[in-house]
Amino acid sequence: MSRYRGPRLRVVRRLGELPGLSRKTPRRAYPPGQHGQGRRKRSEYAIRLEEKQKLLYNYGVTEKQLVRYMKKARRATGSTGQKLLELLEMRLDNTVFRLGMAGTIPGARQLVNHGHVMVNGRIVNIASYQCRPGDVISVRNKDNSRRMVETNMQYPGLANLPEHLEFDKNTLTGKVNDVIKREWVALQINELLVVEYYSRKV
């Protein structure tokens, strides 16, 4: 699938809370569509597919990118599912979002793509850039850039800053101290089901 640009609350109603996609909460608690309120028995495949779609929509990656992350996670040591979440969480757009510089991951991606974010003193406009421990993430020293981030910080997407990050609100500078721990992943997901979904495909 290509990157989703449709109504976000529709996806949230279908898949549950996606903190990276939207700050809004739907008024209706059942899935969208004509049969949304009907009781349906989901197959094993459907359950795994939904977990995979949570990753696609929450982190704003394409199917092709997710397959690439999956292959990379398989090659790494340790739990494949946790490594997959780690790779997605350490993307630059997600890190900017978790620092509170943007209210959603699409908003953070826009900041990065438009050259408002610097990593280690250099402008990085690639949203999929993998942040590493020691990276310093700052806002470009331009009035327009600082104003945008300061406005975004009034309406943060998530209240708590993960323990692997630190952020100075005065200088608008953040630092990556470590790799994210599993308990700090905000998305409610069973990553093992995603690994099982791809076990027959990748």
Image (spheres, grey):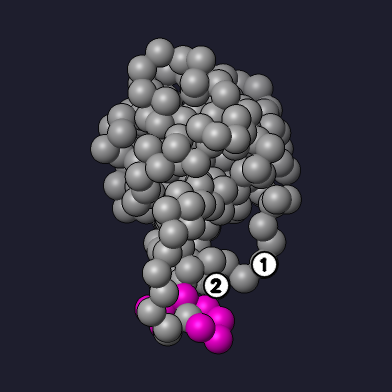
Residue 4 location, x and y as percent? 67, 57
Could you tell me which residue is drawn at 52 percent across and 78 percent down? 32
For marks 1 and 2, give the CA distance. Answer: 8 Å
Magenta stretch?
Answer: 27-35
Residue 87 location, x and y as percent? 49, 28
Quarter of the view holding residue 121: top right
Could you tell me which residue is drawn at 57 percent across and 24 percent down? 71
Q: Secondary structure at mark 2?
A: helix
Please rate how many residues cluster around mark 2, counting C-alpha atoms within 10 Å: few if below 14, some from 14 to 19, many from 20: some
Residue 60 location, x and y as percent? 60, 48
Q: Are marks 1 and 2 in contact (CB under 8 Å)?
A: yes
Question: What type is the residue that disc 2 sits on?
Answer: Arg
In the displayed structure image, the side of residue 164 where residue 26 appears, left or right: right
Up-down: is 71 above or below 60?
above
Q: Nearer the viewer, residue 161 or 31?
A: 31
Q: Secondary structure at mark 1?
A: loop
Q: Which residue is mark 2?
A: 10
Q: How many numbered callouts? A: 2
Q: Which residue is mark 1?
A: 6
Could you tell me which residue is drawn at 55 percent across and 72 percent down? 10
